[in-house]
Image (cartoon, rainbow, N blue to C red):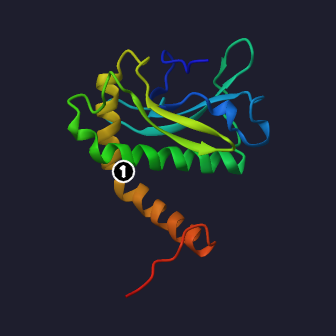
């Protein structure tokens, strides 16, 4: 099931197969995808970016907010990190992505993988990806601070090897 691109949130980076890796709900989840994109509450002249969990009720896409189980928070952090990693080198593409190869990568989780790709279904992707790229750069100080904190905490929890001095 494809994430809609006609609603107020404009997806730029998507993981449309999220239902396959959604914790205990894997393969049976109502959460069909994750996206990073242009926030639905943008005001003229100000661009915010947001993360969204896309829920499908069986009849229509839900606009309902939801509390996020802890693994979804981590999955969104993984998606954000992969997107930041991608955008470090995206300047090499005239459109910030390769329309012929929109897949950014796959992140193995729970015996399957989260496919991360540029949302080429978005009819305004060429414009929206530039806005997203600029907003990501503008917010880099805030995001990087939080990611450094997350990295340090993961290291303290022994999820990340400590650097050896010397």
Viewer-proximal residue among 161 and 151: 161
Does 93 appear above or below 87? above
Observer-nearest of 122 and 44: 122
Q: Secondary structure at mark 1?
A: loop
Q: Quadrant of the C terminus?
A: bottom left
Give the tally of numbered discs: 1
Q: Nearer the viewer, residue 137 or 156?
A: 156
Report the side of 162 relative to 157 (left or right): left
Disc 1 residue crowd, few under 14, some 14–19, many 20+, Cα 10 Å:
few
Which residue is labeled 1 in the image? 139
Q: Residue furthest bottom?
A: 166
On the image, the x and y values in percent for residue 52 come to 57, 35
* Residue 85, position as x, y percentages in the image: 38, 49
* Residue 45 placement: quadrant: top left
* Residue 29 point in image, percent of width and height: 75, 30
The single residue placed furthest to the front in the displayed view is: 111
Q: Measured along the vertical axis of the image, is residue 120 above or below residue 107?
A: above
- Picture layout, residue 126 above or below residue 114: above
User: In this image, 109 relative to 15: left or right?
Assistant: right
Quadrant of the image occupied by residue 144: bottom left
Image quarter in which the N terminus is found: top right
Q: Position of residue 43 (x, y in %)?
A: 38, 31
23 sits left or right of 13 in the view: right
Residue at image coords 56%, 18%: 2
| Residue in view at x 46 percent, y 78 percent | 163
Q: Residue at x 48, y 61 (%)?
A: 146
Give the quadrant of residue 134: top left
């Amino acid at each position: 099931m494809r994430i809609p691109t006609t609603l107020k949130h404009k997806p730029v980076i998507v993981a449309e197969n999220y239902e396959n890796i959604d914790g205990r709900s894997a393969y049976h989840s109502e959460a069909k995808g994750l996206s990073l994109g242009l926030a639905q509450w943008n005001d003229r002249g100000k661009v915010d970016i947001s993360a969204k969990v896309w829920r499908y009720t069986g009849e229509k896409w839900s606009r309902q907010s939801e509390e996020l189980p802890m693994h979804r928070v981590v999955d969104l952090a993984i998606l954000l990190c992969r997107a930041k990693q991608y955008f470090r080198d995206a300047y090499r593409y005239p459109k910030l992505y390769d329309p012929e190869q929109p897949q950014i990568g796959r992140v193995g989780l729970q015996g399957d993988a989260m496919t991360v790709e540029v949302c080429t279904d978005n009819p305004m992707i060429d414009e929206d990806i530039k806005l997203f790229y600029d907003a990501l750069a503008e917010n880099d100080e805030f995001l990087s601070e939080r990611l450094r904190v997350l990295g340090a905490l993961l290291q303290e929890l022994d999820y990340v090897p400590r650097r050896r001095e010397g």
